Image (tube, helix red, strand yellow):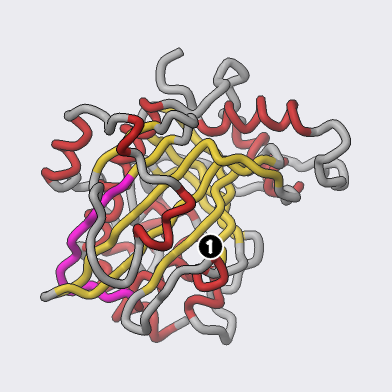
Amino acid sequence: MRRRGMLGAAAIAAGAVTVGIAPRVRAAPTLSSAACAARYPGYRGADFALPYARYMQARTVPAPQVVADAVAGPALPPGAVPRFEDITRDLGPTGTSAVETGYGQGADGVVFVAVRTVMPRVTAAMWDWWFGWHSSEAARYKLWHPDAHRFAALDTDLTTADLTDRQKYVGNTTYVDEYVGPKLQQLGINFRDPVAHGFTVPSDQTIVFGRVGSSIAPVDLGWLAHQVRPIEGGAEMRSRFHLNLRGLHVPNVTQAACAVARGASVDPTDLQLSLDLGRDLLMHCGQEMNHLAAFLPELHAEFSATD
């Protein structure tokens, strides 16, 4: 099967784990299509009246050459794939790792992706603000990757709350529809406290750490982490994905019902997150981080003060 997708794996895993151990939840409500926000490509007319419209671009800029080279090159051999258990050392406050940009699949089936993005003029604080700001509406999410991003919503919208930027997203869940390569994914990403997981995070750095799951099935699929460290002239982001590490979560039944109403992307023939998906995710991450970083300083300066 070509390019097996995350959500199909979630559907299969959900069926395998629901006997006796799945969280008990209320039945999903019956919703009219008007009750759920739409999924749509690009920007539409009303979006251009939004205060941040000047940052909207018709297409995502290309990924850096180092990412394109890694996508075109071979996958890591299984023995060279870092383990998730070592992620706090991999993303330590100093130093570099053997794999900064690449992808592969370990002998245990875990798909690994690493991307390093150099970001002139950017700081870690800007990314903490972005993760607390961008998921309240689809048009904001599309700023990040206008080609692939289709929908975004929050479990609890804290974007205007009197909280720190980290408090707005840590512990919260964002629901997104996006293309990774040719496959539409419908995902729920629950952001976790990186320090509680064992990361060391100096005051001039940040680590955005999340559990990646299906927005429909009560199944977690893996982990992501984006470390932002200062370098001369700006910052570097070191992104990591470890997929096929499954678990369970209590679903948001309203968001699940809306995801189905938008048109569920579940493919029941997809049994496992594949190496192809890892390669596509490498390109996707390399594109979106590079794209947003080019104007994040201006976006942050204009809108962080109004939150």
Vertical side of 92 occupied by 173: above or below: above
- Can residue 153 be seen? no
> In the structure shown, which secondary structural element does the residue marked by tag 1 occupy?
helix
Dominant secondary structure, magenta: strand
Query: Between 96 and 132, which is closer to the camera in this rendering?
Result: 96
* Quadrant of res 122: bottom left
Side of 35 where 221 appears, left or right: left
User: Residue 246's spot in the image, x, y percent?
Assistant: 61, 40
Residue drawn at 86 percent across, 41 percent down: 27
Side of 250 where 79 appears, left or right: left
Vertical side of 50 occupied by 34: above or below: above
Query: Between 180 and 85, which is closer to the camera in this rendering?
Result: 85
Does residue 147 show up magenta in the picture? Answer: no
Residue drawn at 19 percent across, 47 percent down: 61
Magenta highlight range: 114-124
Q: Which residue is mark 1?
A: 136
Side of 275 where 77 appears, left or right: left
User: Residue 215's spot in the image, x, y percent?
Assistant: 63, 43
Hey, what amino acid is under mark 1? Ser
* Quadrant of res 168: bottom right
* Quadrant of res 170: bottom right
Q: Residue furthest front?
A: 79
Vertical side of 213 occupied by 78: above or below: above
* Callout 1 crowding tier (Cα within 10 Å): few <14, some 14–19, many ≥20: many
User: Residue 294's spot in the image, x, y percent?
Assistant: 19, 62
Residue drawn at 70 percent across, 45 percent down: 248
